[in-house]
């Protein structure tokens, strides 16, 4: 980051805090999407397991058959994508928080130096 004066640092800090608030909103939305994807995956997987049992499939093969099912595989994929998006949103939050702390420390140093 280039050398900024205290006023520019305050403006930058406010922007980063706005970015942090947006990231929190995005993380909340992605967390809800993750929960919905996980729920849908588990419910459909349970149905597929019960159907396989009802059809007389061998217990030792049921999980392999269910995991290889196209619908279950697609739902697992959607769940995994939702996990990744949620993880990236939470990482963005951590980056914004760290950036805010660094700028706050720089502002404090500037003010202590000028006091």
Image (tube, rainbow, N blue to C red):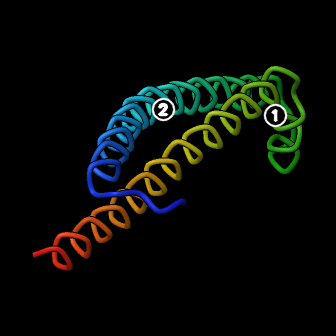
**Viewer-proximal residue, 66 or 24?**
24
The residue tagged 1 is 66
What residue lies at 51% left-to-right and 48% top-to-bottom?
92
Question: How far across and down, in percent of the image, does residue 66 sit?
Answer: 81, 34
Q: Residue 56 carries which label?
A: none
Position of the N terminus, as image quadrant, is bottom right
Front disc: 2 or 1 = 2
Instruction: Pinpoint residue 45: horizontal percent, then vertical percent.
Output: 68, 30
Work out whether 64 lies above or below 57: below
Residue 31 falls left or right of residue 87: left
30 or 41, nearer to the observer? 30
Q: Residue furthest bottom?
A: 113
Residue 35 is tagged as 2
At x 43%, y 51%, the residue is 96
Instruction: Classify mark 2: residues with Cα within 10 Å, few (<14), some (14-19) or many (20+).
Output: some
In the rendered image, residue 95, in percent from the top left (x then y), is placed at 49, 56
- Picture quarter containing residue 106? bottom left
């Amino acid at each position: 980051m280039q050398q900024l004066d205290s006023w520019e640092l305050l403006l930058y800090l406010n922007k980063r805090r706005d970015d942090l608030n947006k990231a929190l909103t995005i993380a909340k939305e992605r967390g809800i999407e993750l929960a919905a994807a996980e729920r849908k995956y588990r419910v459909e997987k349970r149905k597929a397991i019960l159907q396989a049992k009802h059809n007389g499939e061998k217990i030792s093969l049921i999980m392999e058959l269910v995991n290889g099912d196209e619908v279950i595989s697609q739902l697992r994929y959607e769940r995994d994508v939702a996990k990744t998006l949620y993880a990236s949103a939470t990482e963005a939050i951590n980056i914004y928080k760290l950036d805010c702390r660094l700028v706050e420390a720089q502002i404090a140093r500037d003010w202590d130096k000028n006091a």
